[in-house]
Amino acid sequence: MMSPNPLLWREIRARFRDGRAFGLILLLAVALSLFFALLYAQVALLDASTARRVGVTGRTVFTQLSWLQTLGWLLVSPALTSASIAYERERGWFDSLLLSPLTPRAIVLGKWLSALLFAFILALVTLPLFALVFLLLGGVTLRQFFLMAILQAACAMCGAAIGIATSAWSPRAATALRTANGLIFIGFCASIYGAVTAGEVPFALVGGFLGLKTNVFWTFLGRTNPVLRAVEISGDLPIQHTGICLGFLLALTLFFLWAATFYARRPLQEAPFIQKKPAQSAAKSPSTHGEIPFFSRLRFANPVLDREVRAKFRLRQPPLAVIVAEVMLGILVAGFYARTLYWAFFEPMYREWIWWGLCFTGLIVTMMAAALMGSNGVSREREGGTWEGVRLSLLSAGEIVRGKVGASVLTCALFSLPVWPLLLPCVAWNADSAARSLVTRFDVAACLAIWLATAWNYTLIGLWIGRKAPRTSRASGQVLGILTTYLLLSPFVLSNFGPRVANTILGATHPIIALVSAGDGRGDFARSTTLFCAFQLLFGMGVWIAAQSAIAREIGNAAGGENGETRR
């Protein structure tokens, strides 16, 4: 069997020679089967009256599987292609492809189609579950089934195109993965905001309550959200905008494939962030990096902490297209910031919404950022070839771990500073302001404690999982995959062990549920917050000791190998 595109055939063979591909298929099959069984038990078996209504059960299971799988394709498909070109550029292999008879378009299409073929195999794993819903439980029409399949295929195609475009644009695989995830996150949040302002299901009352005004642009953007379209299809709503969403995803796919082809034509020395011409002199060479004035003056006794913090606040000079996009995004963020600040000071009815909305958003961002920074702490050193120097230095394992963890927590804290002007006016600091705000000082203490415990523990978990990964892209993918799987599936799995056991375990291990308990106001939120923080502290200390021991063994092995070479 030979493909018209030899690169496509090579990519397929290389992907399936790696045992991780089969491991991912097995993990997906087990996770979805478990999710299906638990969801069916909750919907059909817990209530005898519901069990008789098989059609309602099938429709409910189909809805949950549909939106979850649609969201999964948006997250998984960019990871399949984001390292395809950037990793070859890092290793110096991509120039050989450019010198081959293959055109840049054939290179891009070969890598994109190979990722889509693997995505199709992953989709086949989920087919038996949808067949059970469609053939046995009922409540789902053939039209819904095929529309959902087309929508998920469009999400996979668009996500893979975004990944291949960022891979062709970026000189590093880790940067490509972060850029692809950032683009999808920004687009998803913007479409959710458009859906809220337009009053779409399930945000019919939220936009009116917040006083948000819509226009043609935000209405159109809200109709392009694939997850909301999956809910429309599975619920068989009378008004659907699936055609608009599919057309938008197709247009994005074509645009990002064109962008990938455009950047793939450029050789490595002309790639973004790489200087095209050597500097004529050291005195006249322009700097491609800049530092924020306040953060550049921070100094720490720990050299690892000092280097990590300075590196995280060092800015690179992006190309003109990225600058224009960042300026446009900055204008939108500034407008939202100014409006939220006005509400926080002069509209007391919105203060509780602002507080908890920003707290939940900040917690989710902190979870992702802390886990990624922890996973890249050692893997970035290995990828850049600097880990050997760190091991052979006079630094102890404890100093290395303290520097990596401290830099992550401090970075999260410093990046949260712009949010505090929005949060502080929402708090009832005294009895006079208590009538105008429901957010108390105890809520502030609980949210701060949960945030700090999450940043601490997730950094350590990321450091432990990614400590042996040779590439940052692999470490980031492993950490995000493991943590996302636990955060999404743990509530369904633990719900079968009774509400008391589930609430106790989730309250101690799940940051979002811990924050929900803190903001509920009906239970003992002080006890739930203390339970979460105590468990996160103890678990983090255990991971700290394990990571420090592993790094100490590596340092000992490096020192022993160097002594052996000296004796010889």
Image (spheres, helix red, strand yellow):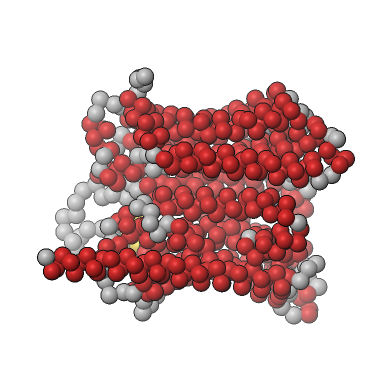
Report if residue 361 is visible in the image.
yes
Q: Which residue is drawn at 35% across and 53% down?
A: 470
Within the image, what quadrant is residue 42 found in? top right
Q: Is residue 71 above or below residue 351?
A: above
Question: Is 93 on the left or on the right of 242, as rendered?
Answer: left
Within the image, what quadrant is residue 512 found in? bottom right
Which residue, as the protein is rendered here, is positioned at the far left?
568
Q: Residue at x 24, y 35 (%)?
A: 96
Q: Is residue 534 above or below residue 161?
A: below
Within the image, what quadrant is residue 296 found in? bottom left
Residue 355: where, in percent of width, then height? 68, 64
Quarter of the image where the C terminus is located: bottom left
Residue in the foreground of this view, choosing between 221 and 180 = 180
Residue in the foreground of this view, choosing between 128 and 283 = 128
**Label total for image:** 0
Residue 427: where, in percent of width, then height? 70, 72
Q: Is residue 277 above or below residue 308?
A: above
Quarter of the image where the N terminus is located: top left
